[in-house]
Image: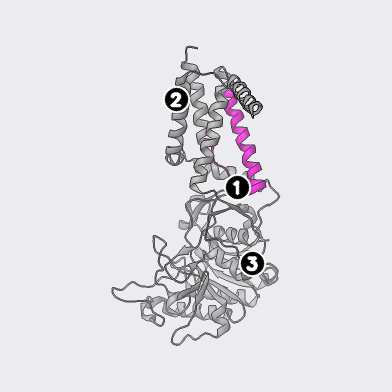
Amino acid sequence: MENLRAYLLALTARIGRGFPKRPPRYWLGAFAVLILSLVIEPWVEDLIAFDHLRNSLFQTLSVATMNRARPGAVKLLLIDDKDFWTDATLEHRQPTNRTYLAGIVRALTKLNASVIAIDFQIPVSERPGATADPGRYDLIEPSYQAETADLMGAVKDAASVHRVVLVRSLSRDARSLVADAVQIYGLCVRLTADGVWDNPGAPGFTLSPLQQRNISCGHVVVPKDAREIPPPGWVGQDGRIDSLSAAIARAVDPANMPDLSHRRYYATYVDPKVLSSKTTMLSGHELLDPHKEALASMLFQGNAVIVGAGWHDGRRADDPESVHDKHDTPAGAVPGVMIHLNSAAAVLERRLFPAIGTTWLYLINALLGTIAVIGFAAVTGWQWRVAALFGAAAILFALQWVTLNLFGIFLDAFIPVFSVGLHSIIERLVSRE
């Protein structure tokens, strides 16, 4: 026991001799900067638009692994500029003409698509005191009633053979369902379990048991963090509502659906050029062109297909900022439908990375920041500290690559480490040592 005590004292003395000798003001200043950087990190990220750099880094690191992003068995039917601005049925109108969407659903049904997902919300008129119970067709705008009936009829027919996924609208706080035409037709009226819906039908719109089982819905709320898979929504019913992407994945492979409700997950992004290629996507006019039926059949037969908007508002096809329903992602700005496609493919391929909880993230950042404080203190001369700052960036880059490969975890400690690095440089420049 006495020998162990002597060994520990000797070890402590050895560590003390090797510990960087710096005046108290250095340590006080360094740890004050570290604590401040941890507190104001979210504000700084917004101020310098750090999320774009972080997302780009995440995408670069994640696609450098063996788990490369690809769309897999999820395909895209994009209503593009030619469809939206020149098609006589669409008439570049919003809300999107539902008779046109009905034609798309029927064409995909004929091509034997395994799952047909419609990324369009179908709102109804809001009237004080009126509830959108099944059969309240009067709540649908009169000029849209016939085309809405056409679309719902196409959905019903498709559900006799294939699975169909529709959009259920959520409130702004994403905690309650908003009345829409889907509900009025007795579809996705209430949740009976996570991602499982009651589809009772409505007067004049009866559904067989098979059709009821084959229809599901999801929400289209996109997370603020562009890396994140859209999580399920809690709407106070008997289950959680899937995102549209998760609903598609559940429809494709219900037996192996992962639980996305208890933690956040990130996903790598498929390159938009790949999503726009003919191996993944066709436009509406190409699908409806009888001369391209063979191409459409080869692409869509047996696959899940998501139908969504991809036109440019104001006919400005050369302006990426005018893309309808544009969202920033780690792979660049894309229409929202491509986010849902990417997330559905990521869930099916388990291309998922667990996000670290906020508490753990702060603790890890604090630990890495503390290591950086000690490391910078061991370096003399401001020039060497500048070099050490770049070295720390390289080490963080390598560390993130390792943790992403081995554990599927993406670390995010650049701002704390850079803050204490800059402090060490400034401290050395103003020091009289």
SS for dot 2: helix
Q: Which residue is mark 1?
A: 409
Which residue, given by chain and number where applicable, does mark 2 sit on?
Answer: 29
Magenta extent: 386-414
**Disc nearer the start of the sequence (2/3):** 2
Residue at the front extreme of this rendering: 1
Real-space Cα separation, disc 3 to disc 1, in angstroms: 22 Å
User: Which amino acid type is shown beneath numbered disc 3?
Assistant: Asn
Q: Indicate the amino acid at tag 1.
A: Ile
- At 48% from the left edge and 82% from the top edge, which residue is drawn? 200
In the figure, residue 128 lies in which quadrant?
bottom left
Which secondary structure is most common in the magenta stretch? helix
**Residue 407 painted magenta:** yes
Residue under circle 3? 256
Residue closest to the eye, 58 or 41: 41
Q: CA distance from mark 2 to mark 3?
A: 52 Å
Q: For numbered disc 1, what is the local secondary structure?
A: loop
